[in-house]
Amino acid sequence: MGQSDYSKNGEARNATDETPSARDILVCIQDERLAFKKRYPCSRSLLRQNSKYFDRLLDPDKFEEGRRIEQELHERAAGNGLAHEKPLPTITVSDLPLLFERPSRANESDLAEILTLFLRMLHGVQVSWPFSGIKEFRSLEFLARLAIIADFFSAPDILHGFVRKVHNNERAAYNGLFGMKNKVPETVVRQQLLIGILLSFSPWIWSGSNYLICKGSGHWSQSSQEDTRSDDGQVAWNMLPNGIEEELFARRQYVLQTISSIQSHFVGLYSSKLIQCKKGYANSTECDSFQLGEMIKFFTRKGSLQMRDMYMQQEAEIYNGDMRDLIARLKECPKYQIDSYHQHCGARTRILPILEALQNFPDYGICMSCWQTDRTKESWLDNPSGGYWTFLSRGSQFGPNCDHNGQSKRMYTAETRNWTSF
Ligand SMILES: [Zn+2]
Ligand SMILES: [Zn+2]
């Protein structure tokens, strides 16, 4: 009996069932949290070939378990007919990562399905997309759980083809998802981002990280960084691995500080002794004072002025909405005039090109190749640029590539920003 039997009868069988000869061992998988226990007939050589986890576990030179299995297989091969009536050698895996938020019957049966799919792929059996028997809208969720399992068993390669297929076949659907226009549940974004991280699939890391930084996360609503650091009892997409959860939280704070620094800059400018009025008339000082007053009224009304109070002792309420809405709100800054002679003296004329540049290129996501090549350099959290940064001209310093990432980081993580050098 060959591999095709596995695809038809991939569900777990008891050790007493007839098992295909190619499946020479049983893998017993247990998860106490779900009261789950099933045995899967498997091929020892294919497990070792396609999973580093199994390769180590079943290595007769390294682990007692591997030695025992080797011994039992040897006895079966050498034995008479009686030996074949004994159950296949069994190896137990009982420390699976958490795949579900809570135990339930449905989750138990999903786990069985996920393990079956995973083991089929590990045995080289073709699996279709969306996964057969699983509703299409749940396939991504299944893929996220499969990615966690594949990561645990050190076999991410078997899912690579899948992710690429989903990405290409359903590009339109996922573009909608990450065009950030539709209301997509955060969990879906996190699942896709996790798949990207575990399987090193850069388009999903890029889009998912941009999305979360821009929209914020329900998991960060307490706004305390300690909250993002506890991963006990969390499914991996709720606490993204490899320092990425902390990095995204930090990036969002930097982006908020940057937007906040624009209004601080202009308030500072119009409060300074340097005349901002374009006219040079006798009433230029009054013009500046008038503009300053109107600007403060506007920012206060928009609720954005309090953001600059983060240095104060009491905790300022941190904006938890969409960055693009914040920029759009600031763009409403009206054109004030103290009188008909002072047409362009206010902040609006100067602030709009800055906001438009930020709005057109809001990229602050994680570039996988930069992150993997030199994480220390790429991380905003561990290695902010600091220093002085100057806005040079209207958007000319933005362009979609790795160099752009570096420029983006220099702007968002600068210590001081000058928005009006041009
Ligand atoms: Zn003026
Ligand atoms: Zn890059």
Image (tube, rainbow, N blue to C red):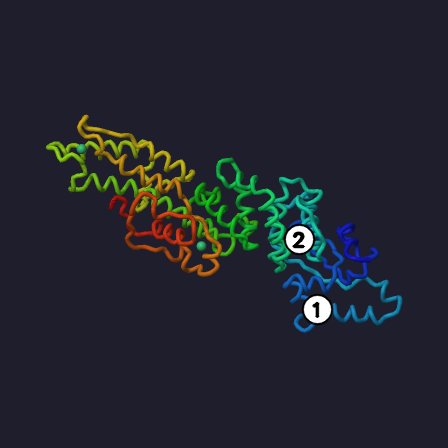
User: Callout 1, which amino acid?
Assistant: Gly
- Label 1 sits on a secondary structure element that is helix
Numbered label tally: 2
Above or below: residue 38 compared with residue 349? below
Q: Percent x, y for residue 344? A: 22, 33
Query: Label 2: which residue?
Result: 32
Above or below: residue 303 compared with residue 76? above
Residue at x 29%, y 40% (from the top left corner) = 263
Side of 144 where 29 appears, left or right: right
Q: Which mark is residue 66?
A: 1
Side of 352 where 142 appears, left or right: right
Q: Residue furthest bottom?
A: 61
User: Callout 2, which amino acid?
Assistant: Glu
Residue at x 34%, y 48% (from the top left corner) = 397
Residue at x 85%, y 64% (from the top left corner) = 84
Q: Residues within 10 Å of mark 2 (few under 14, many from 20)?
A: few
Q: Percent x, y for residue 96? A: 63, 56
Side of 157 where 300 appears, left or right: left
Q: Where is the N terminus found, in terms of image quarters?
A: bottom right
* Mark 1 / mark 2, whichever is N-terminal: 2
Q: Where is the C terminus found, in terms of image quarters?
A: top left
Q: Are marks 1 and 2 in contact (CB under 8 Å)?
A: no
- Label 2 sits on a secondary structure element that is helix
